Amino acid sequence: MPSSRNLAKPYSRGTRIEIVYEDSAKTEEKKHYFDESSPPPKDSKILLHSCCAPCSGAMFEEMLHRGYDVTIFFYNPNIHPRREYEIRKSENKRYAEKHGVPFVDCDYDARSWFQRMRGLEHDPERIGKRCVACFDMRMEVTAAYALKHGFDAFTTTNATSRWKDESQVNGSGLRAARDVMIEHKKGPRFWLNKWQTDAFTKRKYEISAEEKFYKQEYCGCSYSLRDSNTWRKLNGIPAVKIGGDVAGLGTRYFEDAKTDAEEESQEVVDSFFEAARRNFKSAGKVNDGIVSDILTDVYGNRKKNASEKKIALNNW
Ligand code: SF4
């Protein structure tokens, strides 16, 4: 287990980079990653950073199918409160053990996470800089562990959720691989792949329903929990429930793969974030006084479950 207190420095570059797959092969950066045209060789040792069981299912299955030697790395000091963290971790561990895959239970380094997020507390999920800082921290620790333990490549389940910005997630992974490579003159490569396809989304929810995974109601950090509950309160929706057999809204466990996949279709996700970005940009500086207005705009435009229940759930 790495000493993440030393590795996870309380600062953030907070920058967003766009990944241009076509041009990247011509650049020096190519040394820092594998991609679809040049995937990790068969039998490679892959470290899969995992945020939760539902997001790891289809990725993990694909890696085993391709003949990789995969290890799951659970490093998520962002998840709050501790009870929610333990639930997500135990689900993920159960699933890994079922397939005989090693599971690394890393440090719950929550204090460093909060330190690093200082000043970003009111950035909305995905649209502001906080999520980039959160990905950076987790990728830096994953890359350091991969280097220390001789992995050929690493990647993350954050890359498979359409509710995450793929360019933010991949940018963090690439920076982490590059920094390790520059500092140590060797290191694991970050594995870029198109993990957000329709096929992966469908398979992700099939596995989740088959396994009846715990269905989390928010992304994970205390700020996403706060914002989800603010939105719910504004709309008379019950608050998020942590643990227990009954969710605040919707089902506690995954059970309907088709509906879940439809709610994460590219079209639904694109239209939601387009509206959210527009509203965030026009709102200007975020502070306590206007955060509720932004949340109304951001979450109010989300279509998840809207057709059936006439209300919107938050993303995770
Ligand atoms: S909303 Fe999710 S990705 Fe963003 S900072 Fe919170 S836990 Fe991290």
Image (cartoon, helix red, strand yellow):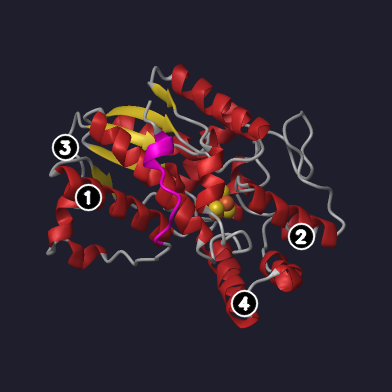
Asked whether disc 4 touches disc 1, contact meaning CB atoms under 8 Å apart, the reply is: no
Q: Nearer the viewer, residue 145 or 259?
A: 145
Q: Which residue is mark 2?
A: 231
| Lower sequence index among marks 2 and 1 | 1
**Up-down: is 98 above or below 68?**
above
Q: Where does residue 283 sit, x and y in percent of width and height?
A: 65, 79
Tag 2 and tag 4, C-beta contact below 8 Å: no
Name the amino acid, label 2.
Answer: Trp
* Dot 4 amino acid type: Lys
Q: Residues within 10 Å of mark 2 (few under 14, many from 20)?
A: many
Viewer-side label of 2, 4: 4
Location of residue 70 (image quadrant): top left
Look at 56% across and 56% down and name the residue there.
Answer: 118
Question: Would you identify the image quadrant in which residue 127 lies?
Answer: bottom right
Q: CA distance from mark 4 to mark 1?
A: 36 Å
Residue with the mark numbered 3: 41
Res. 20 visible in picture: yes
Q: Residue 285 bears which disc, if any?
A: 4
Question: Is residue 121 depicted above or below 152 in this figure?
Answer: below
The amino acid marked with disc number 3 is Pro
Q: Name the residue type under label 1.
A: Tyr
The answer to whether the residues at label 2 and label 1 have Cβ atoms under 8 Å apart is no
- Residue 8 at x, y percent in the picture: 41, 43
> What stretch of residues is rendered in magenta?
4-13
Q: Is residue 7 magenta?
A: yes
- Foreground: disc 3 or disc 2: 2
Residue that label 1 marks: 33
